[in-house]
Image (cartoon, rainbow, N blue to C red):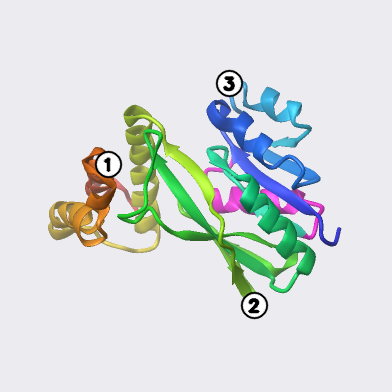
Amino acid sequence: MKGKISVLMITKNAQELLVKSLRSVAGLANEIVVVDDYSTDETVKIAKRFKARIIQNHEEDFGKQRKFSLKQATNSWILVLDSDEIVPICLKKEIKKVVSESKFNGYYIPFNNHFLGKKLRYGGEDYKKLILFKKDKVTITPALVHEKFVIKSGKVGYLKNKVYHYSYRSLLKMYQKFTDYAVREARQKVKNGEKTSLKKIFFYAPHMLWARFIKDRGYKDGFFRLPLDIGFAGMEFLTYFLMLFIKQ
């Protein structure tokens, strides 16, 4: 339907911030589609409270799961949101405005990441993602991790207000996520024909730490974020190390 928005979310055991995330899009979307990978916590129950349409589907490839969720949407405009992302009121108003004007086929939205409840502004944590677009104008790249949305034709705009992202809520969950991502990334790289090496295993990790904390000025956020950047370095090491044991 023209001018109306469908919020698309894929979930798995995502109860922690789901209430805040779904509540933040109240009054913005007239359709919420949750594709759930058979959660065993309260995820489905919470989504039902917000009158979301829930489809349970297992797909290891994040890109394919996103593509599956896109097929379920009935509106012309799509907002892709994760369960740990929140749309503040200022962004909600901006989205309503640009969708009604419909000057572009998609919009990049900036993100404000948080680590242990504190805002991050530097070191790779200030970025934009294409998560608002017309349904028939986008393609999704298959990927075990870090799938992308690409506009097929027409112009793309940029919004000013940010999505609040709370991915790094505890050290344990952060390192668990990084381990999962390293396994996925290793498999993806092998699938794409990339080879590992001693250089990649032992030098890419310290370079990642240097790039995030020094080159991209992560230090300006404060030394409290060092465990995060060390985690990214560890994920880099684990990715290329695991590639030694994965067959193409």
Is the N terminus in the top left, top right, bottom left or bottom right quadrant? Answer: bottom right
Q: Residue at point 29% right, 47% down?
A: 221
Q: Residue at x 75, y 69 (%)?
A: 102
Q: Which residue is mark 2?
A: 155
Q: Nearer the viewer, mark 3 or mark 1?
A: 1
Q: Which residue is mark 3?
A: 41
On the rendered structure, is 72 left or right of 38? right
The quadrant of the image that shows the C terminus is: bottom left
> What amino acid type is highlighted by mark number 1?
Arg
Q: Is there a contact, CB below 8 Å, between mark 3 and mark 1?
A: no
Q: Is residue 143 above or below residue 17?
A: below
Question: Decide: marks 1, 2 in contact (CB < 8 A)?
Answer: no
**Residue at mark 2 to residue at mark 3: CA–CA distance:** 41 Å
Q: State whether residue 159 appears in this view.
A: yes
Q: Which residues are magenta?
A: 58-76
Foreground mark, 2 or 3, reads 2
Q: Is residue 81 magenta?
A: no
Rendered location of residue 130, percent (x, y): 57, 62
User: What residue is drawn where x is 27% and y is 41%?
Assistant: 225
Mark number displayed over residue 225: 1
Q: Residue furthest bottom?
A: 154
Quarter of the rendering containing residue 204: bottom left
